[in-house]
């Protein structure tokens, strides 16, 4: 049994006290609850003598599954070199359940570059300033976990190399001149990294907010690199988690999302058609919000385009858009009618690693009635 409660923190503010062994979930600051847990976790701190086991057990079990799922989604996926070291340390396999991922997440105090949430044990005097992954070395942030059955408790710090984030390709975060950058590798030919850079150069010529990717090298491997888009003031929630928040709180997903930033949603549909993007799933688009007030600020800049120029999508205008299941061409044409999407700077063939991608962008933009200024 865990003898101390786990405290979910937002910066230096206590948000929720949890003891999963005891089924204890006490919401301390409802206004700062993560969107992923709002309307999902039930406060059980008052469930003592007044509730029968039959009544309270389903709620406790659901809380457990929700909180484990939340932690598992925060796991900082490890690069190939570091994965073996961490997984061996906690005797876990590469094939991980949500519980396994939650344990790994807690090794890193459940920190993320995407927001200000983290965990500590009740009574610990560690501060946000000490574990903030944007301001400290990642090895300083990582904490060893003692695993006793379902108990998940933090002990001291452990030194470990860089950790990375979600996704299928090798990645790592590096601090350069005080700025946090994500380095992302592709296959042996560097194809995915080149696609990421190509699309960034295309979007540089438009009026669409996007993450800027540049060519880079890490340990002799060609990569793309980009700055972290969040900071201590602004956090990010992806569409998958935001849609779950809508469902948990009786909100219409489509109406709520459109009401936040319809203009950017339309521009995203246009961009994804033009670049033949096959990978705009709900984990790589979403929203920025104020970390202190929790106010949704709008869609985050577009990113993650290493699966652009998909051959099957380029060859078939009847392809379905993964975001909504609609015909990509028809949906993009509708989007053009509802937003002011423009190319504001001439596009050059030299912007592309693969010359035929230039021709495809021109052709597909033409299918939408868009004219792209070019400089051959």
Image (cartoon, rainbow, N blue to C red):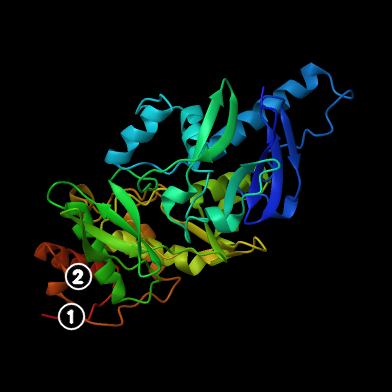
Q: Which mark is residue 362?
A: 2
Residue at image position (29%, 65%) is 213
Answer with mark 1 or mark 2, whichever residue precedes in sequence.
2
Whether residues under marks 1 and 2 lie with C-beta atoms below 8 angstroms apart, the answer is yes
Disc 1 to disc 2, how far (Cα)? 9 Å
Q: Which residue is mark 1?
A: 374
Above or below, comparing residue 306 to residue 146 in the picture: below
Q: Position of residue 153 (x, y in %)?
A: 59, 32
Q: Is residue 315 visible?
A: no
> In this view of the protein, which residue sits in the foreground, 49 or 341?
49
Above or below, comparing residue 346 to residue 144 in the picture: below
Residue at image position (13%, 47%) is 188
Residue at image position (32%, 59%) is 272
**Dot 2: what SS?**
helix
Q: Position of residue 243 (x, y in %)?
A: 56, 48
**Dot 1: what SS?**
strand
> In this view of the protein, which residue sits in the foreground, 198 or 218?
218
Disc 1 residue crowd, few under 14, some 14–19, many 20+, Cα 10 Å: few
> In this view of the protein, which residue sits in the foreground, 285 or 269?
285
Above or below, comparing residue 290 to residue 118 in the picture: below
Above or below, comparing residue 49 to residue 331 in the picture: above
**Number of callouts:** 2
Q: Position of residue 339 (x, y in %)?
A: 44, 73
What quarter of the picture does the C terminus occupy? bottom left
Disc 2 residue crowd, few under 14, some 14–19, many 20+, Cα 10 Å: some
Q: Is residue 194 left or right of residue 90?
A: left
Residue at image position (36%, 41%) is 78
What quarter of the picture does the N terminus occupy? top right
Q: In front of the other: label 1 or label 2?
A: 1
């Amino acid at each position: 049994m865990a003898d101390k409660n786990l405290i979910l923190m937002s910066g230096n503010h206590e948000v929720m006290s949890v003891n999963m062994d005891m089924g204890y979930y006490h919401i301390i600051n409802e206004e700062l609850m993560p969107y992923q847990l709002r309307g999902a976790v039930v406060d059980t701190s008052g469930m003592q003598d007044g509730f029968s086991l039959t009544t309270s057990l389903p709620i406790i079990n659901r809380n457990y599954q929700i909180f484990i799922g939340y932690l598992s989604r925060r796991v900082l996926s490890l690069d190939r070199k570091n994965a073996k070291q961490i997984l061996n340390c906690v005797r876990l396999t590469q094939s991980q359940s949500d519980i396994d991922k939650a344990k790994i997440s807690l090794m890193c105090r459940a920190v993320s570059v995407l927001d200000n949430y983290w965990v500590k044990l009740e009574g610990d005097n560690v501060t946000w300033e000490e574990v903030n992954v944007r301001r400290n070395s990642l090895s300083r942030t990582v904490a060893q976990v003692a695993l006793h059955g379902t108990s998940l408790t933090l002990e001291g710090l452990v030194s470990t190399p860089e950790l990375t984030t979600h996704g299928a390709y090798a990645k790592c975060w590096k601090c350069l001149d005080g700025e946090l950058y994500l380095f992302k590798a592709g296959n042996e030919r560097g194809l995915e990294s080149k696609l990421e850079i190509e699309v960034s150069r295309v979007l540089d010529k438009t009026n669409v907010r996007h993450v800027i990717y540049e060519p880079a090298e890490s340990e002799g491997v060609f990569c793309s690199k980009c700055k972290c888009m969040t900071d201590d003031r602004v956090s990010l929630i992806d569409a998958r988690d935001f849609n779950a928040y809508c469902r948990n709180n009786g909100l219409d997903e489509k109406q709520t999302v459109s009401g936040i930033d319809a203009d950017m949603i339309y521009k995203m549909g246009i961009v994804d058609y033009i670049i033949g993007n096959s990978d705009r799933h709900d984990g790589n688009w979403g929203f920025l919000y104020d970390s202190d007030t929790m106010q949704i600020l709008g869609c985050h800049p577009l990113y993650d385009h290493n699966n652009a120029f998909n051959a099957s999508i380029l060859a078939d205008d009847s392809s379905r858009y993964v975001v909504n299941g609609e015909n990509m061409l028809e949906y993009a044409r509708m989007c053009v009618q509802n937003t002011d999407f423009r190319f504001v700077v001439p596009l050059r063939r030299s912007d592309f690693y693969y010359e035929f991608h230039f021709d495809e962008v021109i052709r597909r933009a033409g299918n939408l009635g868009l004219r792209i200024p070019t400089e051959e």
